[in-house]
Image (cartoon, rainbow, N blue to C red):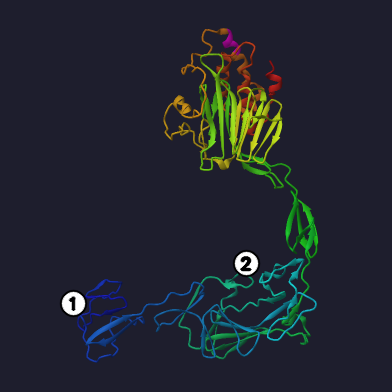
Amino acid sequence: MSVQCLTSIWTVPLLVTTILSVSCAGGQLIAGTIAHCENEGEAVQIPFNLNDPCLTCMCKNREVICIQEKCPELPKDCTLVIKHTEVCCAFCKECRLEGKAYNTSTTWLASTKPCTFHTCLEGVLSKVQVRCVVPCAHPLTSAGTCCPVCKGCMVGGKEYTDGEEFFLDGNPCIKCVCSEGLLQCVQEVCPLLSCPLSLHTFNGQCCPRCHGQRRVFDLRPGSCLFRSYIYSNSESFTMDTCTTCVCTDSTIVCEKRCRHGGDVCSEPDTCCEECILYVQPMRACRMRHNTYQHGQSWSPEPCVRCVCHNGSHECQRTQCPAHTVCPQGQTLRREDHECCAKCVERPATCTVFGDPHYRTFDGKAFNFQGTCRYTLTRDCSPAELFHVLVQNEGRNTRFFSWTKAVEMHLGFSTVKLLPHLRVLVNRTKAPPFYETPTFAVNTTGNLVTVHTTFGITVTWDGNGFVEVAAESYLRGRLCGLCGNYNGHRRDEFLGRDGSFGRDIEGFAESWRADDNEVCDDRVQPHLPDLCAGFRKKRRRARRECRKLTSWGFRRCHEVIDIIPYYKSCIMDMCECPSHKRCFCEAFLAYARACEHEGLRIRWNRSHNCRV
C-alpha cells in the first residue's frame, strides 16, 4: 500500500518483516505497507529512523503516524549557532539572566541598577554603566537623568537644532543629542564578543562585530563558549582590571566597571575609564566667512587644500607632475575645478574639407557633392541637446560643391558660421569673442571655434573647412553625415530612417534637412577622371599635393594615413582655378588630425596658403 506525505504529518509504512525504502519530500509517494499498533498514543520507535531527532512517531487510530518537525529560519545577524544531537533544530545562541531568555543583539536597561545597560551578543551578556561625556565647563544635573547636560546646543562654532543628533568631533563612539535647548552626550561602550579576536570586524561603526557564522555542536548543558574556550558553570575569569566575567546558566555574564570622580587611581595604566568624562570640544575654523569643523578639509582654490585642526587651519599647495605621457587614444587635460591635468579619452573628430570630403567620427572617409542643407551631426538621444547642419553649394562647376556655411542649434540659441569668419548668434552679428552660459565663440587667426557645454566643439575656417570634436560620453548618441560614433566603421552609413546598406549618395541625401530651401542645380553624381586632358593642371596638382609627403609632415605619416588626404588634395586641385591654392583645405585637415594625436607639424596656413 502506498502512503503520501502530507505537509509535516505523514503515515509511515512499517512492518517488522518487510521494510521498504522511505522518504518524505513534499508530496513524494512513499512505498510500503501501513504499520499497525495497539497502544493508542504511545510513542513508537521505528527501525529505519536512524535516530533522526526531527521525526516523532506515535500510535493513532491503531496506525503509526509520524510527524516531521520544521525548523525556523535563523536570524541573518546570528553569528553563533548551537546544535545538539538529540534536538532537531539548531538555534542562535541566546543569553539567560535570572531565568529569562534574551535574543542576541538585544539591549535593555537594568531594573535594579539605574543607568546600567545590559547587552546580549551570542551568549555574552555585558553589564555596562552609562559613560557620560560633558563638553562644557558648567553642566547641569537633574534627578532621573544619567548624565549631566550642557545648556545650549552650540558645539565647535555650530548651532544644533532641537532633536538633532551628531557625533562629537566626528567620533562615532560619542553621540550627542540636542533636546529643548539642552545638550547631552553619551559614549558608547562596546560589549564583549564571543568570537576570537581574529574574527572581529569594523564596518565604519564604533564597536566591532563578529564576522561570519560559527557552529558549535553538543555544547555541554550549563557550560559557556567564549572566544576559543569552554567554561564550566559558575567558572569566572578576568578580562582586564575593569572587567570580570562568570559563566552562569550557559551565559557569559561580564561587568565592565567605570571610575567615578572621587575614586583614587594610583596606577594610571590600570585605571578604569571615568564614568563622567569632561572634555573641551575641538574648536572650529573660520575662513572667508565660512566655518569649518575640526578635521574638515576644503579647497579655497584649485591646487590648494586646507584642513581645520582645533581652531587653526593649515593649507598646502598640490604639486602636479611636470610631464605625463598618456596612453594611445588619450590626451592630457585639466578639468574645471581640478588641480592637475590627467589623461582622459581623446574626443573624436569629424572633418569636412575641400570639394567636400568627409571623415567621420569613427574614421570612415567618403566624398559627397550634394548642394543642399544637411545634418552634419546631432544628438539623437531623447535629450536632443544640439543639431549641427552644413550648407553646401556648387563651386562654379558641374561636378563639385563646397561647404559654404555651418548652422548650430544649441538649446534655444542658433549660431551661424559664415564665409570670411563672420558669426551670427540668433541673427545678430557676434564679436570675435562671445560667451553665454551654454557656448562660447572664440576667433583666433584663421579659425573660429565654438565651444559648448553639450560635449561638442565646432571649428570653422570660413572657406569650407569644418571640424566637429565630440567628447567620449557622446559615444553612441550621434547621427548624421559624421556617423554614429560607436567605434565601428562598418555601420557608418546609417540613414535617417534607420536603414543601412545604401550607397553613399543615398545615405547622404537621407540627411537632407526637411526645411531646406531651394538647392543649387544638382552636380553630376559621377565624377570624371581627375585632370583628364589637362596635363598642366595634373602637374600642378601633383607638385602641390606631394608636399604632404615632405619632411614637415613626416612625423605624422606613421600615425595618420596620408593616402585619403593626398587623393582629396589631387581632386580639389584638378578643379582649382590657377590663382587659387585649393590644396590648403587638405593640408589643414591633415595637420589638424596630426595635432589631435599630439604631434606638432611644421606647417603654417597663414604662410603657406596666402594667395
In the image, taking residue 382 as reference, residue 597 lies left or right, namely: right
Q: Position of residue 219 (x, y in %)?
A: 48, 84
Q: Position of residue 528 (x, y in %)?
A: 48, 14
Q: Amino acid at mark 1?
A: Met
Task: Give the camera-side residue of 374 and 72.
Answer: 374
Marks 1/2 in contact by CB < 8 Å: the verdict is no
Give the image quarter of residue 495.
top left
In the image, taking residue 51 as reference, residue 11 lies left or right, namely: left
Residue located beneath label 2 in the image: 204
Q: Which residues are magenta?
A: 536-540
Task: Give the camera-side residue of 272 and 390.
Answer: 390
Q: Is residue 567 above or below residue 433?
A: above
Residue located beneath label 1 in the image: 1
Q: Amino acid at mark 2?
A: Gly
> For the N terminus, which image quadrant?
bottom left
The residue at the far left in this view is 1
Q: CA distance from mark 1 to mark 2?
A: 62 Å
Q: Residue at x 29, y 74 (%)?
A: 24
In the image, taking residue 475 as reference, residue 551 lies left or right, namely: right
* Residue 331 seen: yes
Q: Residue at x 48, y 27 (%)?
A: 508
Q: Residue at x 71, y 79 (%)?
A: 132
Q: Earlier in the sequence, mark 1 or mark 2?
A: 1
Q: Is residue 72 above or below residue 558?
A: below
